[in-house]
Amino acid sequence: MIEFQAVTKRFDDGTVAVDELNLTVDPGRITVFVGPSGCGKTTSLRMINRMIDATSGAILVDGKDVRQSDPPLLRRGIGYVIQQAGLFPHRTVLDNVATVPVLAGWSRAKARKRAAELLETVGLPATMAGRYPAQLSGGQQQRVGVARALAVDPPVLLMDEPFSAVDPVVREDLQNELLRLQGELDKTIVFVTHDIDEAIKLGDKVAVFRTGGILAQYDKPSELLARPADDFVSNFVGRDRGYRALGFLTASGLTVGEIASVQLGDTAGDARRKLSDGWIVVVDERRHPCGWLSADRLSGVDENATVDADLVMSGGSLYDTEHGSLRSALDSALSSPSAHGVAVNGGGELVGSITADEVLRALAAARTSGEVPQ
Amino acid sequence: MNLLTSWLFDPANWSGSTGVPARLVEHLWYTALALVIAVVIGFPLGAMVGHTKRGGFVLVGAANVLRALPTVGVLTLVVLLAGIGLIPPIAALTLLAIPPIMAGAYAGIGAVEPVVVDAARGVGMTEREILFQVEIPNAMPLIFGGVRSAALQVVATATIAAYVGLGGFGRYVFDGLALHDYPQMAGGAILVAVLAVLVELVLTGVQRLVVSPGLRPVRTSGGIQR
Amino acid sequence: MTWVFDHLGLLGDLTVTHVYLSVLPVVIGLIIAIPLGWAASRWRPARAILLTVSGLLYTIPSLALIVILPALISTKTLDPVNVIITLTVYTIALLVRSIADALSSVPPTIVAAATAIGYRPLKRFVGVEFPLAIPVVVAGLRVAMVSNISLVSVGALIGIAGYGQLFTNGFQLQFVTEIVTGIVATLVLALIADLVLQLIGRLVTPWTRVGR
């Protein structure tokens, strides 16, 4: 557990970076510090491992004031991941990961063995071990950065905008990877970002800071979206917060409708006969949806022609009835060319259709039952 | 300290054709002559290679060989081949000055941002205009750095002209050595040292004038990460 | 060529002296310049002072310093120590700037990462910052080495041993072969020294040669 007690940081030039911060980070959870630049989120993070010392107040890690610890020893017990990974360019991937164990006095052989295990944990092939950081992609470097931070299995992990320098696709991979890892490791993670979407996706709790180092709100992401404390938070959370809040509502009350389907390899005639409202879903032999066919699309196609990938029109997002939220249900309906969202089960098999009207009906039901604030 | 200053502060040594002012003129004359010739030869070569980006490897190799060439060896060799006179020291000093000038021009022009050159080409400049209006002004810090470093080496080394019978401050060093007159030797050495420092200061001032203010290193204030 | 073969013994002696007079200052200079460069990269006032002083020292002509030193430190006029001290001073003047610049150019994120995972300052310097500065340091060493080799020849004019003696002697005897031999020997020595330094530089920095 990490506890900030009335922590203030005033720099030599007089700027107050953090102002009387009181905050308790839950153990075994991901806590995200988010806010615009200059809001003191990074300063707050760096005070935990004494990269910066607080001007007043106290920070306790496991009940012990960090100022009572020798900074290097304190830091070796806290994992740290930074933007662009901060890998040592002159050491191989393996030796980068082995750095902290060696500093902690492990033998080199033992440290390297541990490092090799960790590379596997973060999803890097063993062939990467002998490479230098410059030979890795940004996403791979960041994985090595995470492995290095985990090397001596510290209970606390500090992450300072770790994914901000990689492209959006890789960033999403890394975020999912972090959530998967956290599911296995249960670390106490403090994560700094300026990206509110990242905060909401990763955080068990999110602390929104405002310029001047003031904590504006500290809450669960769903609460942040549903009940922003003030105009600053609601502006920062953004215009789409109503829509994003749907992401925290389970779609259990949703009724999935019938849907017409045809399998790849069937004939165009079959498809034409089964059309419903002029549309039909095409599935593969495992019943996974692969797209849509419409009456327009089928017009002029020979009755005996086979339905193949070339003929199929690509569809929208899929709605997973077992894990999906109202947001993903609504998105599947809005992004579908037929206005019917495609619903699948946990195994990805087609189970039915969903409409935007149905999602709104479920939302109204959730409001009356008190799940969503009026 | 008397050993160092007794000859230097003797007014008798400050007048006449062997006096300090006369030797200063000779020393500066050798320096200037060698520098001008070196600029005429080295600058166009460096600029051409920097602009065309062709032959950089050969140019750097040639500059390295010239740098390693022992100046005293060149000096004595040219004397034996061409006889005593102004030619041997000027040849030796010119060869000394060419590498830094050439390398400065090459590195400076080669390091001008490709986007800047691209933009110049895009607004319709000819290759000649690109070289003179864009590349050379932008490369000025490194070009001038090369000239400055050449000038310092030549001022220091012009001392050796006296070894083959010419004048300059080196005269005092070699005359003092021959006459076992240490104060004279030391006086000559101090004069060379003072002259070198003065030349450095003057060139630093000149550099301020010839380099565009837009190219001065920017000191960002408060940019250090806290 | 016959002259060269007849005087291999002399050439060997001169080579030993020349190498000794030019290499020793580079070694001593490096050892002294590392802590100075480190100080210059760490504290702004130290940087201002060290770089100004080394700039000034670098400006003073070597021949002048070799001549003036005996009066300053009471050595004999033709003592090789004067040459070694002078060239050491040059090496330091040159390297302090390269080392300071090289250390300052180590990316702050890497230094921060090292601090954050628990390096103490000295260990961080030895394990992270200095290794990353090596390519620039080696470039500085190469310049110092080549310039020392040619400066030792200048010393011959006032009686210091080394290849320079081939020039002064050849000049007095009007003997072209001896001078050409000296020039070639100096070039070869400079080339070999440069290659050795490059090779060492490559061996200790394998990470600089990896492609993506």
Image: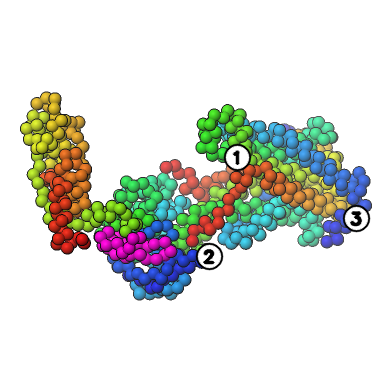
Number of labels in the image equals: 3
Amino acid type, mark 2:
Asp
Q: Chain of mark 1?
A: B
Work out whether mark 3 precedes mark 1 in sequence or the reverse, and give the earlier one. 3
Expressed as whole percent of the image width and height from the top left, the position of residue B197 reads 75, 51
Give whichever of A330, B74 is nearer the camera.
A330
Q: Specify the quadrant of the image occupied by residue B147.
A: top right
Q: Chain of mark 2?
A: A
**Looking at the image, which residue is at 93% across and 52% down?**
B12
Amino acid type, mark 1:
Asn
Is disc 1 surrounded by few (<14), some (14 to 19) or many (20+) residues within 10 Å?
A: many
Expressed as whole percent of the image width and height from the top left, the position of residue C165 reads 77, 43
User: Distance between the Cα atoms at labels 2 and 1?
Assistant: 36 Å
Q: Nearer the viewer, mark 2 or mark 3?
A: 2
Labels 2, 1: one chain: no
Disc 1 designates what residue? B138
Q: Which residues are magenta?
A: A203-232
Q: Is residue A326 above or below residue B101?
A: below
Tag 3, which secondary structure?
Answer: loop
Q: Is residue A231 visible?
A: yes
Is disc 3 surrounded by few (<14), some (14 to 19) or many (20+) residues within 10 Å?
A: few
Residue A341 on the magenta segment: no
Expressed as whole percent of the image width and height from the top left, the position of residue B57 reads 58, 34
Image side of residue C208 versus residue B216, left or right? left
Tag 1, which secondary structure?
Answer: helix
Disc 3 designates what residue? B10
Tag of residue A13: 2
User: Distance between the Cα atoms at labels 2 and 3?
Assistant: 57 Å
Give whichever of A306, B189 is nearer the camera.
A306
Q: Specify the quadrant of the image occupied by residue C184.
A: top right
Q: Specify the quadrant of the image occupied by residue B215.
A: top right
**Looking at the image, which residue is at 28% across and 52% down?**
A240
